[in-house]
Image (spheres, rainbow, N blue to C red):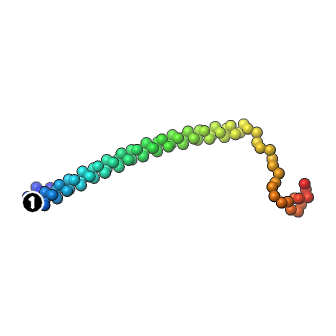
Amino acid sequence: MLATVLNSDRAIAASMAVVEAFVRLRHVVDSNLAFAKRLDELAAKVDRHDRAFTAVFEELKHLAGILPPDPPRGRIGYRTGEEGEAN
């Protein structure tokens, strides 16, 4: 480093600043890796939940097919022309 070439207080301080910067950089990378790992875990959890909800909705659709359909309803609103005379 610079302190090995120049024997001065300023060179020593600069070398220490470089080492401290790399230590901080390593901490940032480590924290980002932990964040990325946690994000992957959450994504997997959401994926499992999505599959569970899909299964529930498929079962609901299946059960809905068993229920009788609603009876037909009459039209709502004003009737005009031939439409009004038919009924």
* Residue lying at 76% horizontally and 39% vertically, measured from the top left: 68
Callout 1 amino acid: Ser
Q: Is residue 77 left or right of residue 5?
A: right
Location of residue 63 in the rendering, given as x and y in whole percent from the top left corner: 68, 37
Residue at the spot of label 1:
8
Location of residue 74 in the rendering, given as x and y in whole percent from the top left corner: 83, 51
Q: Residue furthest left?
A: 7
Q: Is residue 78 left or right of residue 55?
A: right
Location of residue 6 in the rendering, given as x and y in whole percent from the top left corner: 9, 59
- Crowding near the residue tagged with mark 1, few <14, some 14–19, many ≥20 C-alpha atoms within 10 Å: few
Residue at disc 1, secondary structure:
loop
- Residue 5, relative to residue 33: is it above or below? below
- Residue 54, relative to residue 87: is it above or below? above
* Residue lying at 43% horizontally and 44% vertically, measured from the top left: 40
**Quadrant housing the N terminus:** bottom left
Location of residue 67 in the rendering, given as x and y in whole percent from the top left corner: 73, 38
Q: Name the quadrant containing residue 64.
A: top right
Q: Name the quadrant containing residue 59.
A: top right
**Quadrant housing the C terminus:** bottom right
* Residue lying at 58% horizontally and 41% vertically, measured from the top left: 54
* Residue lying at 36% horizontally and 45% vertically, measured from the top left: 34
- Residue 56, relative to residue 3: is it above or below? above
Q: Name the quadrant containing residue 9.
A: bottom left
